[in-house]
Image: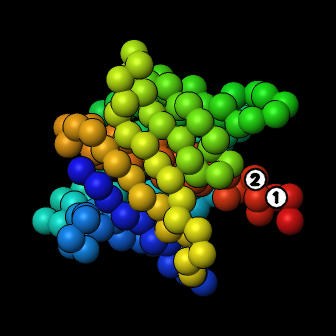
Amino acid sequence: MQYYIKQQLFSWKDRFTVKDARGNDRYFVEGELFSFAKKLRVWNAADEEVLYIEQKLWNWLPTYHLYIDGMEVAQVKKEFTFLRPRYAINGPDWDVEGNVWEHNYTIRENGRVIADIRKEWFTWGDSYVLNIQDEAHAELALGIIIVIDCVLAASQNASS
């Protein structure tokens, strides 16, 4: 499945829609406005919550927990590195490979591609193309991609 994300500019809180290749709304992502830790909820087109993402505070490096149906299914933590950002994914045995800074990377499980992400340049706001190989992994892969984007955005905001 191919999905497209275009984040809205000048939004007071995180809010964006994930569309399919035909331009239909597939998922809606919205963050909580007044929260110390980042909290995001993902709904499908039937208005059912399919994923909840919560940042854990008081960690030295950014750590996020992902929940499906109230159960934690993954933890994504930025690892300490000097050159390129790296992420550890606990839960599924997934690895992130590629250039995360340029939003051009792949999520793999034992060498098999789960999803690949690339940023579309020369657009208003951040726009991404997501290719998810197995629909059964769509929500979790989407959640991990959102977490990586949150960590990158926070580090860019901190440096400016």
Quarter of image, res 19: bottom left
Residue 142: % across, % down: 38, 48
143 and 127: which one is in front?
127
User: Which residue lies at the image location 76% right of the left edge and 58% below the top edge?
Assistant: 156
Tell which residue pokes out farthest to the left in this image.
46
Using the rendered image of the protein, determine whether residue 96 is visible from the camera's viewpoint: yes
Task: Please indicate whether residue 61 sits to the left or right of residue 82 in the image.
Answer: left
Q: Secondary structure at mark 1?
A: helix
Q: Which residue is mark 2?
A: 155
For residue 65, side relative to residue 152 (left or right): left
Quarter of the image where the C terminus is located: bottom right
The Cα atoms of the two marked residues, 2 and 1, are separated by 5 Å
Does 51 sit above or below residue 41?
Answer: above
Residue 121 locus on image (x, y percent):
59, 68
The scheme the figure's colours follow is rainbow
Q: Secondary structure at mark 2?
A: helix
Query: Looking at the picture, how far across and down is residue 59, in whole percent?
Result: 70, 34
Q: Is 64 on the left or on the right of 58, as rendered?
A: left
Q: Amino acid at mark 2?
A: Ser
| In the rendered image, the vertical position of residue 5 relative to residue 116, given as above or below | below
Label 2 with label 1: CB-CB less than 8 Å = yes
The residue nearer to you, when weighing 112 against 34, is 112
Residue kind at label 1, given as amino acid type? Ala
Which residue in the structure is indicated by mark 1? Answer: 158
Instruction: Name which residue lies at 65% across and 52% down.
Output: 102
- In this view, the residue in front, 31 or 124, is 124
| Mark 1 closeness class: few <14, some 14–19, many ≥20 residues within 10 Å | few
Name above or below for residue 46 compared with residue 85: below
